[in-house]
């Protein structure tokens, strides 16, 4: 079946939903999301949104904090306009119904948190459930719009491209999409296709990301021939709850922002050895420090101690973290929290211009799936939701200029051809390869890398990819098979990017090239 829409948005996080609200003023919008509409990385964002909203703060300070954190790879123009365009985007969220936590003291302005790498308190939050609050408000807004339709439990397979006689891509026509519950593949034809599929944390064995974060948009764009940038810069969140029964629960950076102190199991502090900001150092510094201390001691975790704070304050400021830790027998008001690093955020992705346009016409990307130049080699905490908001707005501005003049392509699109495929009778191939890729990435392409480790990872992933490609075309497409194919593609892109960067910078640390070199002060670009 073929569906026609002005806007095809793949993903239902903050980037996709905020764009849908605005795009609906121009034409019809179809949102494709592979689980329930609220399941996204946005929904799991605890910390908040960094923005200059206090009179004692300044754009210059936020810009400077971002540039320092980005280790020389940020695009300064992008950093400046994202920071300066933050206030109107925050006002939009508030107008749409997002309720940020307010201060309990006069003049009762918004309560601002401080997180790693920030020199001031500038993070707006909704207690420690900011992402969930944003998703709630945006979904309420979107559900009231008549010309926006959300297709839950649908997953994008591949982008549909129009090519010229020489086989060169002219533009993007839409995407093939699998209806997961009905096992049917549909064609979505669109004037504009926007990828807002989030990140790729599930490429790693241990991650703070939900199960949906399999790098689908990055893989789809790469297969279509779009430019992919800076995939070596994987941010490992330094403080993930360490417990045998916990499934990678994030302990927000805001806990350190409120004075949480990192300690070894014996109670000794250690961050003073690594950075003058100690426990409030940027994430790459903290993650590397914890990784070093864990390997040195042989322990499996370190501790995050916030017990010196008042009990009532902690329960009120961190209700979600307090409740979740209590489920595992940890009272954060009287016990330090056992933590270890986990894959969290990818600073690379589909390369886009200042308005979210990819290297393929009529294909845009915004949110974590994209590489804008804001984060450089390391993301400053709580800049991600801000980036998604600013870029979704910029995509809207760009499209608005050409929308009335752009006609939907009438180029013929072939219906999806399943060929002679059959139902898979050997699902163990999928599960085994899924597990092997994630372990391979965790062991060889983690916080600390080496040429030898990267070479091993490249060999293993190449073998797995060949097996998956053979399997993929012999059996009917399923959600699990699509995701396996995508995490394999993304894993390969990460390894390729790591091997191209012969230095250490930001989130990429290679023991064979420990220095930061001027000759590598550039983006790593890969095109199929």
Image (cartoon, rainbow, N blue to C red):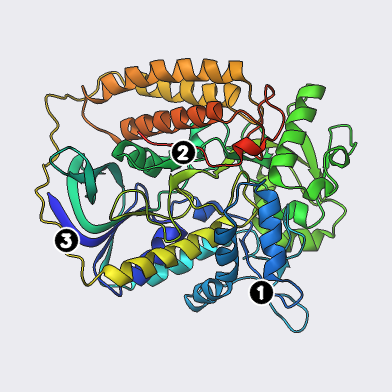
How crowded pointer 2 is (Cα within 10 Å; few <14, some 14-19, many 20+) is rated as some
User: In the structure shown, which secondary structural element does the residue marked by tag 1 occupy?
Assistant: loop
The answer to whether residue 457 is seen in the rendering is yes
Comes first in the chain, label 3 or label 2: 3
User: From what the image shows, is residue 120 above or below residue 429?
Assistant: below
Q: Is residue 118 left or right of residue 434?
A: right
User: From what the image shows, is residue 139 above or below residue 225?
Assistant: below
Q: CA distance from mark 1 to mark 3?
A: 41 Å
Q: CA distance from mark 2 to mark 1?
A: 35 Å
Comes first in the chain, label 2 or label 1: 1
| Residue mark closest to the camera, 1 vs 3 | 3
Comes first in the chain, label 1 or label 3: 1
State the residue at coordinates (76%, 64%).
Answer: 120
- The quadrant of the image that shows the C terminus is top left
Q: Quadrant of the rendered structure where residue 393 is?
A: bottom left
Residue 33: x percent and y percent?
A: 34, 51
Seen from this angle, which residue lies furthest bottom? 107
Q: Which residue position is annotated with label 2?
A: 525
Q: Which residue position is annotated with label 1?
A: 53
164 or 396: nearer the viewer:
164
State the residue at coordinates (80%, 29%).
Answer: 293
Q: Quadrant of the rendered structure where residue 214 is?
A: top left
User: In the structure shown, which secondary structural element does the residue marked by tag 2 occupy?
Assistant: strand
Residue 186: x percent and y percent?
A: 18, 46
Residue 244: x percent and y percent?
A: 64, 30
Q: Which residue position is annotated with label 3?
A: 408
Q: Is residue 230 left or right of residue 330?
A: left
């Amino acid at each position: 079946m073929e569906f026609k829409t002005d806007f095809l948005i793949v993903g239902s996080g903050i980037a996709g939903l905020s764009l849908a609200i605005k795009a609906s003023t121009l034409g019809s919008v179809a949102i494709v999301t592979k689980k329930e509409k609220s399941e996204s990385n946005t929904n799991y964002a605890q910390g908040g949104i960094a923005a200059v909203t206090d009179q004692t703060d300044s754009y210059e300070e936020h810009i400077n904090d971002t540039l320092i954190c980005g280790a020389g790879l940020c695009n300064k123009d992008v950093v400046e306009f994202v920071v300066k365009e933050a206030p109107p985007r925050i006002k939009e969220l508030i107008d749409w119904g997002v309720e940020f936590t307010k201060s309990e003291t006069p003049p009762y302005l918004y309560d601002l948190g401080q997180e790693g790498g920030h020199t001031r308190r500038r993070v707006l939050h909704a207690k420690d459930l900011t992402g969930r609050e944003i998703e709630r408000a945006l979904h309420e807004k979107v559900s009231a719009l008549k010309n926006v339709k959300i297709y839950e439990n649908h997953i994008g397979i591949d982008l549909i491209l129009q090519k010229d006689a020489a086989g060169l891509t002219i533009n993007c026509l839409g995407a093939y999409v699998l209806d997961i519950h009905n096992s049917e593949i549909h064609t979505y034809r669109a004037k504009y296709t926007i990828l807002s599929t989030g990140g790729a944390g599930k490429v790693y064995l241990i991650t703070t990301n939900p199960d949906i974060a399999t790098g689908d948009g990055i893989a789809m764009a790469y297969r279509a021939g779009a430019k992919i940038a800076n995939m070596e810069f994987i941010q490992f969140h330094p403080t993930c709850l360490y417990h045998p029964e916990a499934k990678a629960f994030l302990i927000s950076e805001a806990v350190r922002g409120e004075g949480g102190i990192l300690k070894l199991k014996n109670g000794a502090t250690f961050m003073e050895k690594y950075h003058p900001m100690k426990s409030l150092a940027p994430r790459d510094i903290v993650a590397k420090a914890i990784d070093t201390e864990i390997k040195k001691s042989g322990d499996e975790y370190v501790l995050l101690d916030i017990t010196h704070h008042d009990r009532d304050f902690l329960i009120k400021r961190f209700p979600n973290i307090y409740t979740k830790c209590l489920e595992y027998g940890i009272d954060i008001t009287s016990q330090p929290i056992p933590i270890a690093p986990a894959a969290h955020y990818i600073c690379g992705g589909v390369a886009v211009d200042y308005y979210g346009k990819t290297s393929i016409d009529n294909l845009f990307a915004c949110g974590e799936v994209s590489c804008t130049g804001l984060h450089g080699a390391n993301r400053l905490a709580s800049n991600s939701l801000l980036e998604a908001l600013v870029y979704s707005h910029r995509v809207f501005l760009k499209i608005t200029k050409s929308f009335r003049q752009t006609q939907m392509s009438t180029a013929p699109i072939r219906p999806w051809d399943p060929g002679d495929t059959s139902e898979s009778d050997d699902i163990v191939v999928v599960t085994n390869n899924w597990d092997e890729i994630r372990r391979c990435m965790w062991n060889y392409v983690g916080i600390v890398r080496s040429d030898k480790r990267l070479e091993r990872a490249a060999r293993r992933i190449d073998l797995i990819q060949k097996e998956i490609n053979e399997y993929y075309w012999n059996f009917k497409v399923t959600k699990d098979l699509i995701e396996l194919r995508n995490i394999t593609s993304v894993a390969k892109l990460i390894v390729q990017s790591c091997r191209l960067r012969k230095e250490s910078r930001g989130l990429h640390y290679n023991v064979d090239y420990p220095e930061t070199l001027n000759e590598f002060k550039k983006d790593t670009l890969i095109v199929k």
